[in-house]
Amino acid sequence: MFPKTLSTGLALAALCLILAQGIARAADAPAPAPAVSADDSTLASRLAAAVPKGTRLVVAEQAGEASVPWELSGQGKDAPYQATFATFNGGPAVLEALVSGAVDVGYVGEAPIPIAVGAGVKDLVAIAITANPGSPANTYLVIQPDRGIQKVEDLRGRTVAYPAGTGRHMILAGILHEHGLDLRKDVKGVQVAGSEVAPTFASRAVDAAIVLGHQYFRLGSPPVLANGAGHNWGLNPIVARKAALQDPGKAAAIADFIRRAVAMYNWQSTHPDEWIKASYVKRMGLAFGQGKLLLDEEGLGAYYPIDQPLTDVFQQISDGLAETGALSHKIQIAPYVDGRYNAIVEAQNRIDRVTPRPLVNDRAIDDGSNRPDSKPFVLR
C-alpha cells in the first residue's frame, strides 16, 4: 500500500477545484474549438506533481488500446509512476481482474458494467468515458454462405456464436430484437470466449457469429447480415476499483493517467495513419487498407464529462440490455459512474481543441439488414 499522505489528498482536491473553475459545458449545438486557458497550460505539471514517489499503476486493456498509444503518442515517457499494462480477452475478464484487485483501472465497452452490476458486482465505478454515437463499432453479424440465410429473420432456430457479457452480446441481442427475434428463445445461442467466436465460425460449427473487424477479415470476408450501427453508442469506460480511488496516492496517479488517456485518444484522431499501422497492421495483422476501412467506418468519438446527459445514455443502454435479454433485469447505473475527474477531461479536451459533438445517436450507418434486395453484403 502506498502512503496515504494528507498533503497529497489536499493537493489533489485543490487541483480539481482549480480545474473546475471556469469550465464551460458544451452546448447542445456544435461549438467552435474551445480556447486554452492559462490554468490549462500547467495542467500536466500540476497533476504529475501530486503523485507520490514510488506509486505504481496497473492498467487492464484489450488489444493494446492503451499501451500502444501510450508509447506512440509520447504520453508515457514522463509519467510520475510506474505504469504496467495487462492485456485481457474481453470486458468481463477485465472486470474480473479489477474485482480481484489484480489491476487498478481497466478499459471496457458499454455492456460489461451493467451486466456485472446485474450479477451483483458493487465495488467498481466508471471514471472516464468515451462516446462514439452511431458507430457500427467494427462489429459484424456474419453467416455461412451456404446455409440458405438471406436476412436476419432467417436466423430463427439457427446457431449463433457470441461472447456473453460483452458489447457484442449487446449488439447481437439488439439486432435480433429489431427483427422480431429474441436471443434467449428464438435462436440457438452458442456462448464462447471472445477469442473463440471466429474459430468456432471458421470450423463451421455454427450458422452465424458476431465478430470484430479484424476477425472478419481473417475469416475471409464472409457475408454480413448486419453491423453494430444503431445498436451501439460507442461508450467505452475506464473503470476503477473503489479501493484504488480511496488511496490518495493511487487516486493522484489515476488523475494523471486520465489526462494522458484523453490526450492519447485525441492524438489518434490527428494521427490516423500511425494508429492504423501500429494497431490494425502490426498488432492485428491486417493490411493497411483493411485497417483504414475499419477506422473510417468506425470513426473516433471523444471523452465526455460524466454528467447527467451521459449518465442518462448509459441508463438507456442498461435498460436496452434488459429489454433484449442481455441483462436479466433492469439496474440503476448512476451509482456506478463517478465524475470526479470531469474537470481534467474537459481541460485536456480544451488543450487539444476537441469539442465533443452533441450526445445524440444520429450517426447510424445503414447496418445492411434492411436493403431492398435482402441479400448479405461484404465490406469493400
Image (spheres, rainbow, N blue to C red):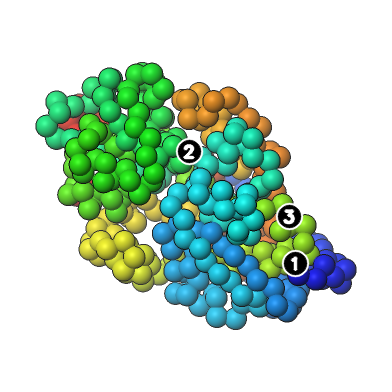
**Residue 318 spot, x, y in % from top left:** 56, 33
Density class for disc 2 (Cα within 10 Å; few <14, some 14-19, many ≥20) is: many
- Closer to the chain start, of discs 3 and 2, is 2
Give the residue number, with chain letter if any, for mark 1: 1
Distance in Å between CA atoms under marks 3 and 2: 24 Å
The amino acid on which the numbered mark 2 sits, given as a three-letter code, is Gly
Give the residue number, with chain letter if any, for mark 2: 165
At a point 28% along the width and 28% down the height, the residue shown is 159
Give the residue number, with chain letter if any, for mark 3: 243
**Residue 222 spot, x, y in % from top left:** 18, 42
Distance in Å between CA atoms under marks 3 and 1: 11 Å
In the image, farthest residue toward the right = 6
The amino acid on which the numbered mark 1 sits, given as a three-letter code, is Met
In this rendering, position of residue 278 left or right of residue 51:
left
Q: Nearer the viewer, mark 3 or mark 1?
A: 1
Q: Element type at marker 3?
A: helix
- Closer to the chain start, of discs 2 and 1, is 1
